[in-house]
Amino acid sequence: MAHDFNNILTSISGSVGVIERKSDKLIDLKGNIQRIHSAVEMATNLTQRLLAFARKQHLEPEVIEINHLIESVAEIISLSVDERIILITDLPEEETYVRIDPGQLESALLNLCINSSHAIAEDGTISIRVEVNGVESVSISVTDNGCGMDQETLDRVYEPFFTTRRTSAGSGLGLSMVFGFIKQSGGEMGITSEKGEGTTVTLVIPQAPVEELVPNTAITFDKPYRILLVEDDLQTLLRAKTMLQEMGLVCIEANSYGSAKVLIDNGTFFDVLFTDVQLEDGKTGWDLAEASIKACADQKVVVTSGRFPKALEPEGESLEKITRLAKPYTKEELAEALHQQLQRFNMVGFTKH
């Protein structure tokens, strides 16, 4: 913990020092402020991961149909792993309901499958299997035919910051986050592995009690508006995409500033731009907002971030009409932000039923 936080604080401290030394000169400090903001975002994300391990994160459990969730997350997983890896799903024929935070479960499955892909040196397979254990629980198993782990490594896999990958390739919080989330949700997690034979991670989560199997309040819009979703964090992208699709909206995905800019420059039609503020290589969602508004003066835009420092926001009358959505956000908050933009242009928003 001290090592990771020290790196983040060093970045913050160094950038602040530069600003202090140059504060008496008329120079553009935007780059330094941007680096401070990015470092704080990193610290926030690391804190959230620690809270997940400590089983004290904020969860929003819902009654969900597990087969539907697996099928949805499989699409993103397929795009996130190497083309040489085949993803297989084995699901029960009957609908099966569990009570859990769907976004966090999707992130956990994505995390496990990416870990599996890193363990596969050449061509290989990853399978996601769901088994119903009577009326009490459901088991979700993620199995790969990768390099596997010896007993010494297996004994330490839940330790936070323990990783077998090279120093710069991961924080070592992935499995510990999944473990904390599953335990906090009232479930269990187990891992079996053999060196050279592959690994199976099994999540056992509670089924939803019969009395809870009633329709949840659904949020739908009057028509399938097209949303350009820009998010460079795959787990957040997955969660946001699921929310949008559950509202009956069409999601156009872009996992980088560059890919989103190409879509905007090529005239791709979308009703609302929904973008993260912090993107790769110092680019921001504000840049995309400016580009999309320049292309279409009436463009509807929602930007999201953990915080919105005024120093980073561009000036301009059109940008004042952009809706800001603080992270983390719920489906209801996202729907309200989109509704605010649609309503501004006399378009019907959403309804709950």
Image (spheres, rainbow, N blue to C red):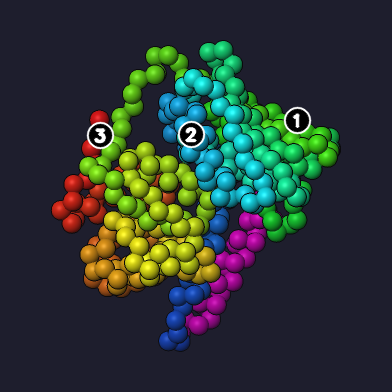
Q: Residue at x 42, y 50 (%)?
A: 327
Q: Amino acid at mark 2?
A: Leu
Q: Residues within 10 Å of mark 2 (few under 14, many from 20)?
A: some
State which tag comes first along the sequence, 2 or 1. 2
- Residue 313 image position (x, y, % from top left): 36, 68
Is residue 4 placed above or below 35 in the rendered structure? above
Label 2 near label 3: C-beta < 8 Å? no
Q: Amino acid at mark 3?
A: Lys
Quadrant in which the C terminus appears: top left
C-alpha span from label 1 to label 3: 44 Å
Picture disc at residue 352: 3
Magenta region includes residue 65:
no
Which residue, given by chain and number where applicable, does mark 1 sit on?
Answer: 192
Main structural element of the magenta stretch: helix, strand or loop? helix
State which tag comes first along the sequence, 3 or 2. 2
Relative horizontal placement of residue 305, taking residue 189 as reference (left or right): left
SS at badge 3: strand
Report the mark closest to the observer, 3 or 2: 2
Q: Residue at x 64, y 52 (%)?
A: 82
Please name whichever residue, 198 or 267, is drawn nearer the observer in this view of the structure.
Answer: 267
Label 1 near label 2: C-beta < 8 Å? no
Give the residues drawn in magenta, as a range: 1-24
Q: Residues within 10 Å of mark 3 (few under 14, many from 20)?
A: few
Which residue, given by chain and number where applicable, does mark 2 sit on?
Answer: 69
Please name whichever residue, 162 or 189, is drawn nearer the observer in this view of the structure.
Answer: 189
- Residue 169 image position (x, y, % from top left): 69, 56
Number of labelled discs?
3
Whether residue 177 is visible:
no
Relative horizontal placement of residue 210, taking residue 149 as reference (left or right): left
Magenta region includes residue 21:
yes
Whether residue 38 is visible:
yes
Relative horizontal placement of residue 288, taking residue 106 as reference (left or right): left
